[in-house]
C-alpha cells in the first residue's frame, strides 16, 4: 500500500475509468492486496491445505480470535480479490451494490489479444479472466464477483441497498438476471446522530417552530448566495454529482420554463461535473444565468462546494430527477431539515414525503427523456400549486422520518449467515475451478507476468518498487467509448431549434420515418397548438357480405 500508485492519488479514492495503464495497475495492485489479506484472515473452509500456503511464514498466521468468517465487498472495486485466494472458492463472499451503474467495465471488446494483456496486468491466467471477468464481450470486474457467488454459493450473497433498487437490478441488468435467481435487499440505515437538533423550549407547536426556523434561514441563505431576499419565494435545490444518473440535464432543460412560469421560484444547483451530461447542464445553466433574464433567482456552482449551513433549512423543495438511485441520502438529509422532495419514483427514492413522477415503464426500463421532462414539469406544477398548510404538514412529516440502525444490523447478520451456509453447502458439490495453476500476487507493472510472479504459495506481492521506468501510466492501452465532447455536442444538437428551416427539416424527417414504419396506412397530417399531428388509419379486409369500415388510430 506504500507504492506510488496507491499514495499518489489525485483527489479520488479510485481512478476514473479502466482504459489507462495507471488505472489498471492500481486496481491490479489493490485487488492483490485485498486477496492477500483474505488469504490470511478469512477462515474459508478451514481445511489444512489452506494453512499449507503459509508454511514459509511470509505472513504470520493471526490467532483464531482475529479470523473473519466472510468477505464483505462493496461494489466492484475489489471484485477480483477472491480470485487470488488459493484454492479458488475457499472464501465466502457477500457483495452489497451501492451503485451498480458502475461495474469496472472496459469499453473495448475483450478479444484474445486484450485478454492476454489483461491477464498479464492482473497476474491471473487468461482462463480465469475469461471465465469470471468477461460479460457480454467486455471485461467487467463486477461480473467476477457475481459469477463467483453463483458458482460457489449457489447465487446467494448479492444484495442491494434498497428493495426497489434490488428489483430493478434483477429486472433490467442481464448480469444479474442471467446469473442469479434474485438480488437481496438490505436498506441502508441513517444514524440518528446525523439528525439536526432544532427543537426549543417554547410552547409553540413543532410545526410552527419548524416554519419559523426555515423562514429565518431562508433570508440568511438568500443573502449568502446572492438571491433576491423574498420570504414568499420557494427555494429549489439540487446538490450532488452532475452526471447522467442524477438527471442534472433534465433540470437544465426545464430551468428556463420553471423560472418563467413561477415567478416566486428560485433555483440553486451545486455539485461537481462528472460526465458529458453534467458538462451539458453546466453550459446551459451558466448561459441562462449570464443572460440576466432571471437575475437573483438562479445560483449555479458546477464544482465541489460545501453549501452554507443555512441552505438546507432554507430549502423548500429538494429536486432529484434521477434516472437511477440506489438509496438516496440527499433526500433524507434535506427531509430532516424540513424540505419536501420533488423526485422521480425510482430505486430508493420515495421514502420521504414529496411529489414524485414515474421514471420506468411497465418493463422496468427507464422512460425516454421527453417523458422524464414531462413528469418533472408535472411534479413542479403540483409542488408550486400546493398550499402553505399542506407543505408545512409534509415538512413536519419529513422531519420525523427515521431509518434505524439496529434492524439493519440484524438483517445484515442474517444475510451473512445465508451466504456462509450457501458457501458451505455448495463447496461440497463444486470443486475449485480452475486448479491452482494461477500465478500468485505479482507486480502488474510488468507485461511479462509469468516471469515476475512468485510461486503460488506466496500470498503477498513481490517487490513493487521493481517497475519499468519507461512505462507511461497515462497511456490508454484500451479504446474508450464516445468522448464527452462529442456527447455534449450531440445533446446540444438534439435541442429543438426555433428556426423555421430546422422545423421544416424535422417535419420532413418525421413524415419519412412514419411513412416507412407504417406502410399500408393512410396518414392525415395537421397541426394542433403549434405541434405537428398525424392521424393514421387503414382499411381492414372486409368480409364479402359486409361493407368496408374505416378504423382511425391516433398517434
Image (tube, grey):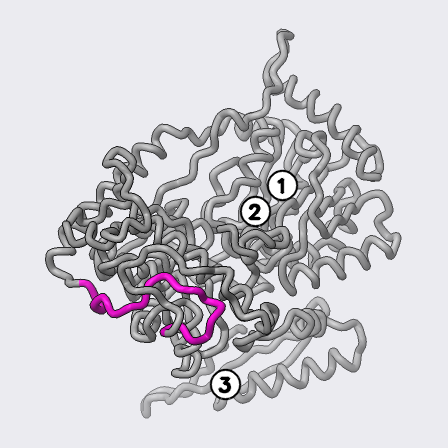
Of the residues under marks 2 and 1, which one precedes in the sequence? Answer: 1
Which dot marks residue 343? 2
Q: State whether residue 536 is above or below residue 56.
A: below
- Residue 170, magenta (yes or no): no
Secondary-structure class at tag 3: loop
Which dot marks residue 497? none
**In the figure, residue 281 lies in which quadrant?**
bottom right
Of the residues under marks 3 and 2, which one precedes in the sequence? Answer: 2
- Disc 3 to disc 1: CB gap under 8 Å: no
Quarter holding the C terminus? Answer: bottom right
Secondary-structure class at tag 1: strand
Q: Residue at x 57, y 40 (%)?
A: 330
Q: State whether residue 257 is above or below residue 496.
A: above
**In the figure, residue 417 lies in which quadrant?**
top left
Q: Residue furthest front?
A: 56
> Which one is in front in this view, the residue at disc 3 or the one at disc 2?
2
Of the residues under marks 3 and 1, which one precedes in the sequence? Answer: 1
Considering depth in this image, is 379 or 284 the residue closer to the camera? 284
Dot 3: few (<14), some (14–19), or many (≥20) neighbours within 10 Å? few
- Residue 361 seen by the camera: no
Give the image location of residue 30, x and y in percent.
45, 56
Secondary-structure class at tag 2: strand
Q: Residue at x 59, y 44 (%)?
A: 342
Residue bearing mark 3: 518
Q: What secondary structure do most residues of the magenta stretch adopt?
A: loop
Residue bearing mark 1: 318
Considering depth in this image, is 8 or 187 the residue closer to the camera? 8
- Disc 2 to disc 1: CB gap under 8 Å: yes
Find the magenta span and give its range: 432-450
Dot 2: few (<14), some (14–19), or many (≥20) neighbours within 10 Å? many
Considering depth in this image, is 357 or 167 the residue closer to the camera? 167
Amino acid at each position: 500500500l506504500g507504492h506510488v500508485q496507491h499514495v499518489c492519488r489525485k483527489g479520488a479514492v479510485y481512478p476514473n475509468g479502466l482504459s489507462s495503464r495507471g488505472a489498471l495497475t492500481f486496481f491490479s495492485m489493490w485487488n492483490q492486496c485485498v486477496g492477500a489479506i483474505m488469504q490470511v484472515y478469512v477462515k474459508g473452509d478451514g481445511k489444512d491445505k489452506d494453512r499449507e500456503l503459509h508454511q514459509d511464514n511470509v505472513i504470520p498466521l493471526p490467532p483464531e480470535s482475529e479470523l473473519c468468517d466472510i468477505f464483505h465487498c462493496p461494489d466492484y472495486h475489489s471484485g477480483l480479490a477472491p480470485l487470488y485466494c488459493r484454492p479458488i472458492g475457499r472464501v465466502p463472499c457477500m457483495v452489497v451494490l451501492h451503485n451498480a451503474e458502475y461495474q469496472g467495465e472496459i469499453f473495448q471488446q475483450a478479444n484474445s489479444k486484450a485478454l492476454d494483456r489483461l491477464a498479464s496486468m492482473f497476474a491471473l491466467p487468461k482462463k480465469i479472466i475469461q471465465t469470471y471477468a468477461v460479460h457480454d464481450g467486455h471485461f467487467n470486474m463486477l461480473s467476477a464477483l457475481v459469477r463467483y457467488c453463483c458458482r460457489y454459493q449457489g447465487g446467494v450473497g448479492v444484495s442491494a441497498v434498497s428493495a426497489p433498487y434490488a428489483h430493478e437490478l434483477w429486472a433490467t441488468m442481464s448480469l444479474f438476471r442471467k446469473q442469479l435467481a434474485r438480488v437481496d435487499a438490505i436498506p441502508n440505515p441513517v444514524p440518528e446522530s446525523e439528525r439536526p437538533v432544532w427543537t426549543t423550549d417554547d410552547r409553540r407547536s413543532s410545526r410552527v417552530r419548524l416554519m419559523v426556523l426555515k423562514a429565518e434561514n431562508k433570508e440568511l441563505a438568500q443573502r449568502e448566495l446572492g438571491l433576491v431576499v423574498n420570504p414568499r419565494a420557494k427555494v429549489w435545490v439540487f446538490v450532488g454529482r452532475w452526471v447522467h444518473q442524477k438527471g442534472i440535464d433534465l433540470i437544465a432543460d426545464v430551468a428556463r420554463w420553471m423560472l418563467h412560469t413561477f415567478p416566486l421560484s428560485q433555483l440553486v444547483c451545486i455539485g461537481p461535473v462528472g460526465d458529458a451530461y453534467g458538462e451539458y447542464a453546466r453550459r446551459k445553466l451558466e448561459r441562462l444565468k449570464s443572460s440576466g433574464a432571471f437575475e437573483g433567482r438562479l445560483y449555479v456552482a458546477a464544482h465541489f462546494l460545501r453549501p452554507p449551513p443555512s441552505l438546507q433549512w432554507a430549502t423548500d423543495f429538494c429536486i432529484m430527477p434521477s434516472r437511477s438511485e440506489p438509496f438516496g441520502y440527499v433526500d433524507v438529509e434535506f427531509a430532516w431539515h424540513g424540505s419536501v422532495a420533488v423526485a422521480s419514483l425510482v430505486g430508493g427514492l420515495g421514502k420521504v414525503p414529496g411529489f414524485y413522477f414515474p421514471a420506468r415503464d411497465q418493463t422496468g426500463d427507464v422512460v425516454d427523456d421527453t417523458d422524464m421532462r414531462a413528469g418533472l414539469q408535472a411534479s413542479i406544477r403540483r409542488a408550486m400549486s400546493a398550499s402553505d398548510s399542506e407543505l408545512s404538514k409534509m415538512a413536519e412529516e419529513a422531519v420525523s422520518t427515521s431509518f434505524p440502525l439496529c434492524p439493519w444490523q440484524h438483517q445484515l447478520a442474517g444475510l451473512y449467515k445465508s451466504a456462509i451456509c450457501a458457501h458451505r453447502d455448495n463447496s461440497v458439490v463444486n470443486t475449485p475451478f480452475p486448479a491452482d495453476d494461477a500465478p500468485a500476487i505479482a507486480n502488474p507493472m510488468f507485461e511479462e507476468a509469468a516471469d515476475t510472479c512468485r510461486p503460488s504459495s506466496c500470498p503477498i506481492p513481490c517487490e513493487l518498487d521493481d517497475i519499468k521506468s519507461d512505462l507511461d501510466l497515462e497511456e490508454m492501452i484500451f479504446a474508450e467509448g464516445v468522448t464527452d465532447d462529442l456527447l455534449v455536442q450531440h445533446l446540444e444538437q438534439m435541442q429543438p431549434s426555433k428556426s423555421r428551416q430546422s422545423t421544416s427539416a424535422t417535419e420532413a424527417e418525421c413524415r419519412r420515418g412514419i411513412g416507412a414504419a407504417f406502410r399500408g396506412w393512410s396518414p392525415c397530417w395537421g397541426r394542433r397548438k403549434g405541434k405537428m399531428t398525424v392521424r393514421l388509419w387503414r382499411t381492414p379486409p372486409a368480409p364479402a357480405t359486409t361493407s368496408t369500415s374505416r378504423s382511425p388510430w391516433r398517434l
